[in-house]
Amino acid sequence: MSTRPFWVLFILCIVIISELLIIKPTLDWWLTESIATSDIQYNQVFPNASPQPERIVERNDIKNFSLIRKIDAMINEDRIWTSIYILLFIITGALIGVLAGSILFRQIIKLNDHLREWSTTDKLISLLGLIIGLLISFLFLPAIFTITSVKSPLIMAFTGLLITYGCIMALLSMKDDIKYYVIPGLSKDAEVDDKIQKPKILDTNVIIDGRISDVSQTGFLEGKIYIPTFVLEELQHIADSSDSLRRARGRRGLDILNQMRKDMSHDLIIKQSAPVDPENTEEVDARLVKLAKEIDGYIVTNDFNLNKVAELQGVKVLNINELANALKPVVLPGEEMSINIIKDGKEINQGIGYLDDGTMIVVEGARKYIGSYVDVIVTSVLQTVAGKMIFANLKSVQEEEEDLIDRNIRNYSSVRPRKKTR
């Protein structure tokens, strides 16, 4: 729903309040001073009173004047300039109201978005703090101001707001200690880790990658998933590229988002944000980090540079590549396995195969077995930046080498000369 009608009504209310609380007292003071310093005759203001041609209006008389009577008196004295001044006062009040109302309305919208991201516990505790703050204000503030002889309603209202705000912040700071005792139905056993439930923000690369859809469907990625509008704009820009490869990548990313929205519409949220230049990846990354700080969320990515920049600024990053590497099976030297040799390696007689997770295995002497499965024995494992590399030998060759070594050891032991003993 559009907020424009609410904005118009809100601005109108603030303008009226500004006119009544700021402009009216100021106008009343100006009229009082203008009448007191002028030579307005008493009978000009009170034509029905007994004739007093020599009497000039004094300050004691002005105290009993209403605002309309003061305006009428000044208009009778100087119609043009009085009308101009009054009009300037009214316009000034309207401008103050529009400016203050616009700023206040934007802050209310931000507060509303922030409150939507609060947990139910935070909302209930804030409501409890609001009730306590209002009770303290209504019960104790009148007595305190009576003792101190303070009669200004603005000061009383401002003090009440400070007390209420302090109560809300105090209870929120102690929510972990009091939510189990104040809110029925909550227990420590049912506590959900806030870190797991923090919102996740997807960047463009991880959407195009596609694995995030499978991860989210498995249930390992909990909490709300945010898609900023500037990420959608970048995806659309890639999908409209003249380069066929980039265009295919962008369209694939949009298809993945549509599929995720159908599968988990209750968790996927499009986060409205100001537009950025899709060509400037640094600006997009900076906005992602800023948004993660604003909503206290995590960035989900597979971009190495964004990962480092976010970590430097204290933003938690969930890297899909790191997750994939962590889920790869652990292979130890001496382990046996069956591998399909797909292609030849860089060195002579080497064959290359892959595990189910994509880990490459280099098998010595397996070039002639390309296109068939062979039994191999792992000799070593190398961890690189790109992932793991496994080196292995053919099981038959490895067994022959081990038998040869055993025979050599036995032969050496049998022909070794004995020491003579005396």
Image (cartoon, helix red, strand yellow):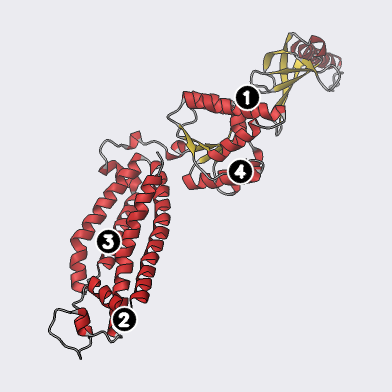
Under mark 3, the amino acid is Gly
Q: Mark 4 or 1 closer to N-term?
A: 4
In this rendering, the answer to whether 195 lies above or below 244 is below
Residue 246 x/y as whole percent: 69, 30
Q: Which residue is mark 1?
A: 330
- Which residue is farthest bottom? 54
Q: Which residue is mark 3?
A: 160
Under mark 4, the amino acid is Val
Nearer to the camera, 48 or 238: 48
Task: Say whether residue 80 is visible.
Answer: yes
In this rendering, the answer to whether 124 lies above or below 29 is above
Give SS at disc 2. Answer: helix
Give SS at disc 4. Answer: helix
Q: Mark 2 or 1 closer to N-term?
A: 2
Q: Mark 2 or 4 closer to N-term?
A: 2
Which numbered mark, 2 or 1, is in the foreground of this view? 2
Q: Which residue is mark 2?
A: 34
Using the numbered discs, state the Cα–Cα distance from disc 1 to disc 3 in whole angstroms: 63 Å
Using the numbered discs, state the Cα–Cα distance from disc 4 to disc 1 in whole angstroms: 37 Å
Under mark 2, the amino acid is Ser
Q: Which residue is mark 4?
A: 284
Using the numbered discs, state the Cα–Cα distance from disc 3 to disc 2 in whole angstroms: 37 Å
Q: Mark 3 or 2 closer to N-term?
A: 2
Q: Pointers 1 and 3 in contact (CB under 8 A)?
A: no
- Graded by Cα atoms within 10 Å as few (under 14), some (14 to 19) or many (20 or more), the crowding at tag 2 reads some
Task: Say whether residue 326 is visible.
Answer: no
